Amino acid sequence: MTMSRSAIAPSRSGPVLVVAFAILLVAMPRMSLAQDVPAFRQGLWEYQRAADGNTYGASECLDPGEELKRQQTTLQKIGCKLSPTTHAGSTWTYSADCTVKLPSGAMSFSKTSVLTADSDTAYQVETRTTGKTGTTSQVISAHRVADCTN
């Protein structure tokens, strides 16, 4: 899921974390296999991201299921090894181990996400990311608000 094509402020933890955060936004929550992606309705979606005591919002016109599939491909291209998704009821759990090559060297991190689909118009993702600098957690809540206008 892409949070938005508009800016969502990352934390102030330095340039490497800014790059990592950007990669994680692209990766969120796309780590499931294409056949394991929940079905959501296309439309205008609003997102609220809570992390490190801060909340950020964004909106975008998209089909979250298709966006999840696109992001899976991106994760694999940057060097992430995706685990098989587990699915029970309305919950999907997935993880990735990633090593990303940066100009300053390689950065490794692992990520586990739990996506809970309330319906085809609302979901929440809880994510824990562990890397060299420690573990961070974030929660993204998303809901469809309208049809897209062209």
Image (spheres, helix red, strand yellow):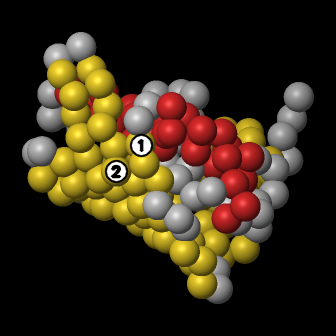
For the residue marked with disc 1, what is the amino acid?
Cys
Horizontal side of residue 19 vs 144, given as left or right: left
The residue beneath circle 1 is 80
Horizontal side of residue 116 vs 146, given as left or right: left
Q: Nearer the viewer, residue 128 or 5?
A: 128
- Which secondary structure lies at badge 2? strand
Exactly how many numbered labels are in the figure?
A: 2
Residue 132 visible (yes or no): yes
State the residue at coordinates (72%, 73%). 119
What quarter of the picture does the C terminus occupy?
top right
State the residue at coordinates (60%, 38%). 73
- The quarter holding residue 86 reads bottom right
Q: Position of residue 96 (x, y in %)?
A: 40, 54
Q: Are marks 1 and 2 in contact (CB under 8 Å)?
A: yes
The residue beneath circle 2 is 97
Residue at the farthest right position: 150
Q: Nearer the viewer, residue 13 or 85?
A: 85
- Which secondary structure lies at badge 1? strand
Q: Position of residue 19 (x, y in %)?
A: 30, 27
Q: Position of residue 30 (x, y in %)?
A: 56, 50
In the displayed structure, would residue 105 be above or below residue 130?
above
In the displayed structure, would residue 83 be above or below residue 42?
below
Q: CA distance from mark 1 to mark 2?
A: 5 Å
Horizontal side of residue 107 vs 123, given as left or right: left
Residue 64 visible (yes or no): no
Q: Nearer the viewer, residue 103 or 25?
A: 103
